[in-house]
Amino acid sequence: MKKINTHGGNIIFITFLAAFILSMVPLPQMLQAIRPEFFIIVLIYWCIALPNRIGVGFGWIAGLVYDVSMDSLLGQHALTFALIAYLAIKLHQRIRVFPVWQQALTIFVLMMFQGTITLWIKGMIGHAPPLSVFMLPAISTALFWPPTYILLRQVRRHFQIN
């Protein structure tokens, strides 16, 4: 019987929990519009770093929990998180060799994709927000990618998560 390596599972959970908490911290209205999607940054990082451990199913479940906690349409974030996880896993070998600034551009494109799907879903139910509602978080998320990437990589190396 093959032993499953669960080394570092608690650390991965803690990083997702921290990202979840950062996503829920109340901000002033002006800053709320540019809040980075911390949970998606962490999801993309772990999908790129450990595509065999964090995947589409995890993105779907995490999205459902996110939907319930954020009081949004059930399945909205689940769909987008699962699609983002799928694309990150599919492209992980390419993204990993990019310099960090090119990775940030890739994150921006993924965030624009996520924003487009969110805009489409909200438009279907009659609550279409203005275009800036998903443009500004995509920019701020891309800007937060380099420090988050470096921090999570150091955590992964320090705790030898593989």
Image (cartoon, rainbow, N blue to C red):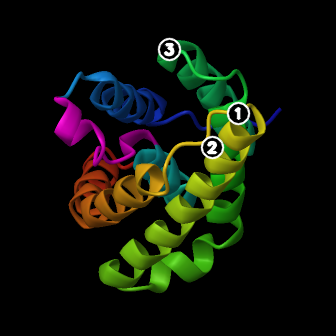
Label 2 sits on residue? 81
Residue 37 in the magenta stretch? The answer is yes
Magenta stretch?
Answer: 28-39
Q: Amino acid at mark 2?
A: Phe
Q: Which mark is residue 69?
A: 3
Residue to which mark 1 is pinned = 126
- Crowding at label 2, few (<14), some or many (≥20) Cα neighbours within 10 Å? many
Disc 1 residue type (three-letter): Gly
Q: Which residue is depicted at the point 25% across and 23% down?
A: 25
Q: Is residue 38 above or below residue 135?
A: above
Kind of residue at disc 3: Ser
What x and y, as percent, mark residue 87? 68, 63
Q: Secondary structure at mark 1?
A: loop
Judge by depth and name the residue closer to the eye, 98 or 110: 110
Q: What residue sits 22% from the left and 54% below the top?
A: 151
Image quadrant assignment for residue 73: top right
**Residue drawn where x is 63% and y is 54% of the image:** 84
Q: Quadrant of residue 16?
A: top left
